[in-house]
Amino acid sequence: MKQSSLFIMMICIIAALGGLLFGFDMAVISGVLPLMQDQFALSPAQEGWLVSSALVGCIIGVAFSGSLSDRLGRKKLLVAAAILFFISALGCALLDTYAHIIWSRILAGVGVGIASNIVPLYLSEIAPAHKRGRFVTYYQLAVTVGILIAYLSNYGLLLSAENINLHNDTFSYLFGEEVWRGMFLVGALPALLFLIGLFFVPESPRWLIQNGKREQGIRILEKISSEEEAEQSIASISEQSESRQGSYKDLLAPSMRRPLLLGLLLPFFSQFCGINAIIYYGPTILTDAGISLSNSFQSQIIFGVANMLFTFIAIWKVDQLGRRPLYLIGTACAAISLLLTGVFFYLDNVPGILILIAVSFFLASFAFSIGPLKFVVASEIFPTHIRGRALGLSIMVMWVADAAVGQITAVMLGSIGTAFTFWFFAFFCVVAFMTVYRLLPETKGKSLEEIEKFWSNENSASK
């Protein structure tokens, strides 16, 4: 049993590296943006495209990864994501022109799109039922670690660039003269580790059994769980399976209407609560508050630490307290903190420390609720035969919403002002609270097959 626990933890850590790269690639742009803006004299539209180009790639990655993972398996898609992460990090660091960097960012986005879809899906299928929420939340923790690494490396490279003697060599070019290239290059190391680690993880046993590879699936289940848990999983998977392939049409079945609505709305709210507006435009917002560029980078590190530390609350409580209570508490706190932040900007001349506290409170609220629970809930509410496609559609909504937020935030900051921008995001936190209160049942401790039966039974009872 101890050996199986160690093995599944190793699998979880390797898979979660996909989340770390997701967080890093999304957050690194916050440090790169002001430096590239100075060097290339970017227009507001070009700044927006630099931010949202990766999000276009995310949409592309999600669009094909769901159906491909249902056909080819989860592991092959993760390997493809790791390769894309590595190539894009090198491209952003070494290619010369703005246009080439945009193409590299799109490649990074495709990798992020695949990882954001397949990693939580893979973790939900390989984790024991009583630990599933915790294991999928490890993915969100890895995302926050990736964000923090991006902030730390951006700040560290910015400081060290001042002390590098500029010579006509590659090192000085990447880490001194054009330090933003070094910021991108840091991502190549975790991408390489992710790629190597994937050779040591198995395919999803549920996918194997679902696709007629029963013996392989059983061997993996016996390796990652106790004999009793393995037998229960095999029986329930076989009962629900019937070796059928799913299609998007299955999502329109009456029993799928409520999970589909939840699967679409939760990722939408996760973006329109304003999290990535702070990640992408953090230095810009803080500079507007009278905080210098160097100090705004330090402040973002504080944001990153808060985001990471409070994710541990979700890991600690998601399988004890449950998904629904955590989400309700988190959205209520997020709405309050965003309202307060808006008030501070509206009043003007408010000390920067109050703004930092308010934004940190929002990030903490997001980190233990809205952030991880969208992945936990979306990865467990759909049947196995359609889960890859359904989660792909769910994550697609997240990235489309993210791209929209990336574009409209700059516009809102320049037109309606920072205060009203934060109030705009607070409104969606309130709507998210009401939606979860009305629609989300508690799923903690239930196997994926039990959740599938719940939707079917509820539909039968309503007839």
Image (cartoon, rainbow, N blue to C red):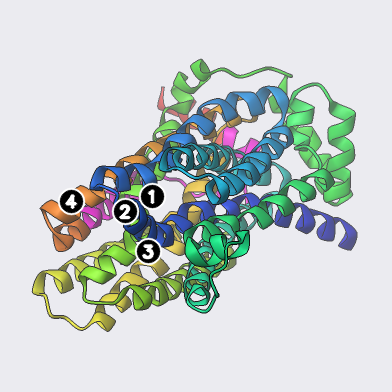
Quadrant (top left, top right, bottom left, bottom right) of the N terminus: bottom right
Q: Callout 4 environment at 10 Å: few (<14), some (14 to 19), or many (20+)?
A: some
Ranked by sequence position, the earlier of labels 4 and 2 is 2
Residue at x 44%, y 40% (from the top left corner): 102
**Residue that carries the numbered disc 1 in the rendered image:** 270
Residue 317 in the figure: left or right of residue 79: left
Residue type of the residue flagged with mark 3: Ile
**Residue that carries the numbered disc 4 in the rendered image:** 412
Real-space CA distance between mark 2 and mark 3, rounded to the nearest whole angstrom? 14 Å
Q: Nearer the viewer, residue 208 or 350?
A: 350
- Secondary structure, mark 2, is loop
- Secondary structure, mark 3, is helix
Residue type of the residue flagged with mark 4: Met
2 vs 3, front mark: 2
Residue type of the residue flagged with mark 2: Cys
Is residue 451 located in the magenta-colored stretch of the structure? yes
Ranked by sequence position, the earlier of labels 1 and 4 is 1
Residue type of the residue flagged with mark 1: Ser
Q: Which residues are magenta?
A: 424-453
Is residue 234 located in the magenta-colored stretch of the structure? no
Real-space CA distance between mark 3 and mark 1, rounded to the nearest whole angstrom? 15 Å
Residue 273 image label: 2
- Secondary structure, mark 1, is helix
**Residue that carries the numbered disc 3 in the rendered image:** 329
Q: Nearer the viewer, residue 167 or 10?
A: 167
Residue 42 seen from this side: yes
Ranked by sequence position, the earlier of labels 2 and 3 is 2
Residue at x 16%, y 70% (from the top left corner): 345
